Image: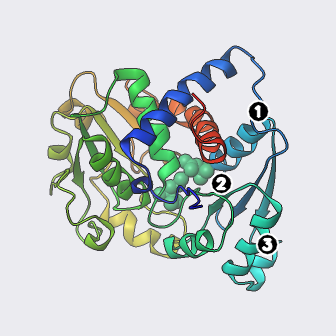
Amino acid sequence: MAINHFLQISDFTLDEFNYVIERSHVIKKKFKNYETYHPLTDRTLVMVFEKNSTRTRLSFEAGMHQLGGAAIYLNTRDSQLGRGEPVEDAAQVMSRMCDIIMIRTFGQEIIERFAAHSRVPVINGLTNEHHPCQVLADIFTYIEHRGSVAGKTVAWVGDANNMLYSWLQAAQVFGFHVNVSTPKGYDIDPKLVARDNDRYTVFTSPSDACEGADLVTTDVWTSMGFEEENAARLKAFEGWIVDGAKMERAKPDALFMHCLPAHRGEEVAAEVIDGPQSVVWDEAENRLHVQKALMEYLLLGRIA
Ligand code: CP
Ligand code: NVA
């Protein structure tokens, strides 16, 4: 039987996303009502981190606990992964002992090789190329605040990074448009975008990209794994800050999102991230709810 993995947004159909989003609402409501809900009793999640994390670790670990299961944290530093054990072997071993695996690592090919050798579902907790759990949480957050995202315009101001590629895949699945503005030299890598993806437009000016947007979003200028480029990026990204003037170009009821952690004064002005249009804390909290729904779906299938 084929195992369902969640390695990038394009792994799921719109129908599957709609189901997971519906379950996210139900599971969130139970959490808010302090209702015990243990569909994953005796199930174990392994979380493998090759990069730092606050939100991803917390939301997966707390989420599995709240669903009645257990979560085990492994990192490169003190597991055999850091000493060169092949990912294929690690996948065989972990998936014989546990029921579901979440990985945060570098190249997407690493998680793909891992999944190909796993007996259980694998979830991408961030790679250099994708961050599908965050974009799922962001779409859920948009729906909570504004309803369906279909037909809307999302402005992406900043680096062509994992978050952007997941947004571009989501645009195809959910039927919205992304206005992208990246500084020269940090543009979209066409190899990471489906050839038939006509759901985005590239803008030279970051302010023009925000024009009429329903949602403005950005992310750090230097992602994990690219730290040695930090000084060059600080220069190249000057002008790509999401500030009040850029938010003025968006629709009056536009939301602002950032996956966090954020750098006030670099990619976003404090007036925006701490202002009334920002929903960044909801995005962070919703990681918990959507990932619980995702794990429930990957392990139990459709139960409602
Ligand atoms: N947004 C996000 O994935 O945060 P962490 O790096 O803290 O997990
Ligand atoms: N693009 C960022 C996201 C962090 C959650 C990074 O990869 O570091």
Q: Which residue is mark 1?
A: 66
Q: Position of residue 71 (x, y in %)?
A: 80, 49
Amino acid type at image mark 1: Gln
Among numbered discs 1 and 2, the one appearing first in the sequence: 2
Amino acid type at image mark 2: Ser
- Asked if residue 156 shows in the view, the reply is no
- Check residue 53 in the rendering and tell me which mark sits there, or answer none: 2
Q: Is mark 2 within 8 Å of ligand 1?
A: yes
Image side of residue 109 versus residue 62, left or right: left
Q: What residue is drawn where x is 36% and y is 58%?
A: 165
Q: Position of residue 140 (x, y in %)?
A: 45, 32
Q: Position of residue 179 (x, y in %)?
A: 21, 48
Image side of residue 74 versus residue 224, left or right: right
Marks 1 and 2 close (CB-CB < 8 Å): no
**Label 3 Cα neighbours within 10 Å, binned few <14 / some 14-19 / many ≥20:** some
SS label for mark 2 = loop
Residue most toward the front? 1
- Of tags 1 and 2, which is closer to the observer? 1
Q: Kindly report the distance in space between the C-alpha atoms of the residues bearing marks 1 and 3.
A: 26 Å
SS label for mark 1 = helix
Among numbered discs 2 and 3, the one appearing first in the sequence: 2
Q: What residue is drawn where x is 30% and y is 73%?
A: 191
Quadrant in which the N terminus is drawn: bottom right
Quadrant in which the C terminus is drawn: top right
Query: In this orientation, which residue lies closer to the viewer: 197 or 106?
Result: 197
**Label 2 Cα neighbours within 10 Å, binned few <14 / some 14-19 / many ≥20:** few
Q: Kindly report the distance in space between the C-alpha atoms of the residues bearing marks 2 and 3.
A: 24 Å
Q: Kindly report the distance in space between the C-alpha atoms of the residues bearing marks 1 and 2.
A: 20 Å
- Check residue 93 in the rendering and tell me which mark sits there, or answer none: 3
Amino acid type at image mark 3: Val
Q: What residue is drawn where x is 41% and y is 51%?
A: 266
